Amino acid sequence: MPDADHIAAIRAGSARYSRGGLAHLVLEVVAYPVDEAEAGTTDRVLVTLHSDGSISVEDNGRGTNVYFDEHGKPMVKPIMATRDVRFFDNPSAESLPDGLPRTGMSVVAALSSWLIHENRRSDGAWTRRYEYGLPETALTEVEAGRPTGTVVHFRPDPDVFGDQPLTADELRPLLATFPTEARLEVRSA
């Protein structure tokens, strides 16, 4: 279940959680496939800076675990809209390459006008849209023709970040400092 109070607290404290700017949001998302790379399930992560100001992070991993409830409804861990206790406001949370502590995906979702999580596994593919950190759609099955992996596509909230541009040249050096064997790429589209 989404944690609306948690998301509201992030939005109310947006100055605190946005202090690393757009690059930090990207690093928060990339940290998850980097974790997967350590487990040997991902070897490529592509960050795309879209011309509309949105950003997508795509990996070729196994996809987010999906399970089905007693009615056959697909379910995923609500990572986008709940506190990740490993990182959020945890004084011992690891630092990301920008030197700021990791806070989790809920911060990215809460500080984005919209976020779309697409999840492709060997047994199916699903997507869900979030607006300002909360789910706006049910987990919806989509065609599974593409390889396995995860895509997190988000539009940072202009009310929080203004019209800050993020360039591939700014992001590449930060991505290069992640301790991973995975290939981390950045492109503009």
Image (spheres, rainbow, N blue to C red):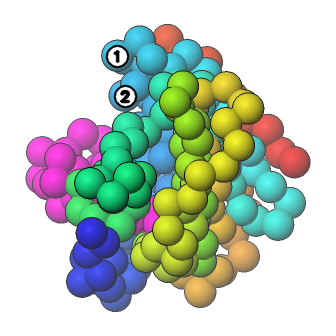
Q: Is residue 51 visible?
A: yes
The residue depicted at 72 percent of the width and 31 percent of the height is: 146
Percent position of residue 80, x then y: 40, 60
Classify 47 as above or below 10: above
Which residue has dot 2 on it?
A: 35
Q: Is residue 136 above or below residue 66?
A: below
Q: Secondary structure at mark 2?
A: helix
Q: Residue at x 64, y 80 (%)?
A: 158
Which segment did they paint magenta?
Answer: 85-109
Does the segment drawn in magenta span residue 151? no
User: SS of the residue at dot 1?
Assistant: loop
Q: Nearer the viewer, residue 97 or 52?
A: 52
Side of 48 relative to 14 (left or right): right
Q: Identify which amino acid the numbered label 1 is placed on.
A: Ala
Task: Assign the N terminus to one quadrant of the image.
Answer: bottom left
The answer to if 104 sits in the magenta stretch is yes
Real-space Cα separation, disc 1 to disc 2, in angstroms: 7 Å
Residue reaching furthest left? 91
Q: Residue at x 55, y 16 (%)?
A: 43
Residue occupied by mark 1: 39
Q: In x, y percent, where is residue 125?
A: 58, 41
Question: Is the residue marked by circle 2 packed among few (<14), some (14-19), or many (20+) residues within 10 Å?
Answer: some
